[in-house]
Image (spheres, helix red, strand yellow):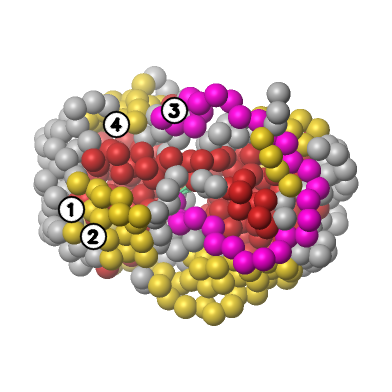
Amino acid sequence: MSGSDQASQDWIASTGEPIRGEIRVPGDKSVSHRAIMLGALADGVSEIDGFLEGEDTRATAAAFAAMGVRIEATGDGRRTVHGVGLHGLEAPAQAIDCGNAGTGMRLLAGLLAGQAFDSKLVGDASLSRRPMRRVTEPLARMGARIDTADGGVPPLRIHGNSALQGIEFNTPIASAQVKSAVLLAGLYARGTTEVREPHPTRDYTERMLSAMGWPIEFSPGFARLQGGGQLKPVRINVPADISSAAFFIVAATVVPGSDLLLRGVGLNPRRTGLLDALRAMGADISVLDPREEGGEPVGDLRIRSAALHGIEVPVELVPDMIDEFPALFVAAAAADGVTRVRGAAELRVKESDRIALMSTGLRSLGIRVEETPDGADIHGGLLQGGEIDSGGDHRIAMSFVVAAQLAKGPVRISDCANVATSFPGFMELATSAGLNVAPAGD
Ligand code: S3P
């Protein structure tokens, strides 16, 4: 069951302690989804360590279990995936519920387009509003037959037994989900599939395919592979998710007296835009013990509090920090001067309209924000207490927990159950690090 179907859960957050100690946030969501998917298609047994025990990634694991893949949970964050090979999936008996997960649904659409059976993908209320034509259109060009609901939204009905043909796809949207859907369909297609992006996006699909022995050429903004082949099973170490670390990075930066160590954070260059933006604003972030784990750059991040000033966020950083804008908005509210965000219209079609919800929420805490279609100008200032609508969006909820640490009064945040989609145990970990957040008593 996805979080938004559960009883609405409100939280109260307010000023806490300086943010201190050593913590490790849960595993990366993008890597966890792909580890299950590609592990399921491999010939043999893959081991995953550091798997995100969140609702989104568990929904993906459940989807493959429903298609006959044995996935053993051998411990917290551990999965043994008994891959069935590229053509070994079985028709699911029911519709596959992707919950809140856009990544789950869009990548599955590409992968299922190449199967011999029909399937149907459904999602929760938020996912059911999100645009799917960005994947169904290129997949249709490859020969896939996928029906959407009116307006190009879920559910997706995917017709099996389509003969797929490789394409050269110049995607108009910088989206790793779109790129990955096309590449996964490309595994099943005749000939070559090639994707070019307007700005480079995260390349976990390409890296994992390559690590599993599938010939693939890729460089920032480009990927090319041939259909037909085999995936070798692998051991996958999932790094800590920098998108979950983001809330602690901003909290430790803006709460005076903080000094925090975040262990084992994934530092793939397509994900570190927030670090660049915050450093440009004056943040004190150092990377300790940079290393490689399972083919991914990883490091420990030490964050000490620092005075921030507003910046114009460079547009080229946008894809590299696309999930971190809610947290960045909070840093901007705490900064001296104006922070300008542009070129980020994608934020309007995430789990919620993140530009609207962050702008409205910050305004209700006393911050001046001017919205534009593709961004906002955020004027740093003093935060007051108030009431926030998270829109059921996990990252909006966690961002306002951070904002509340600076507020003059308590902040009540509605509908926080979906934090469990990406960050199980957030409240406990946040509290252990010094943040003040608790369930609201009615
Ligand atoms: C993801 C890609 C991003 C990101 C999402 C995860 C992925 O979406 O927002 O949380 O795992 O490929 P887009 O690629 O659509 O921007």
Is residue 114 among the parts visible in the rendering?
yes
Relative height, residue 223 to residue 439 (above, below):
below
Image quarter in which the N terminus is found: top left
Disc ID at residue 319 = none
User: Are circles 3 and 2 on residues that touch, CB within 8 Å?
Assistant: no
Q: Amino acid at mark 3?
A: Asp
Q: In what element is the residue under mark 2?
A: strand
Dot 1 amino acid type: Gly
The residue sitting at 49% across, 65% down in the picture is 266
Looking at the image, tell me whether mark 2 or mark 1 is earlier in sequence order: 2
Q: Is residue 49 left or right of residue 265?
A: left
Residue annotated with mark 3: 124
Q: What residue span does the magenta drawing correspond to?
A: 1-29
Q: Which residue is mark 2?
A: 46
Give the distance between the C-alpha atoms of the residues marked 1 and 4, in whole angstroms: 19 Å
Residue pointed to by mark 4 = 96
Of callouts 4 and 3, the N-terminal one = 4
- Spatial CA distance of label 3 from label 1 is 28 Å
Q: Amino acid at mark 4?
A: Ile
Q: CA distance from mark 4 to mark 2?
A: 23 Å
**Residue sitting at 71 percent across and 64 percent down?**
20
Depth check: give the residue in front, 70 or 195.
Answer: 70
**Sequence-first tag of 3 and 1:** 1
Q: CA distance from mark 2 to mark 1?
A: 7 Å
Residue 23: say if magenta: yes
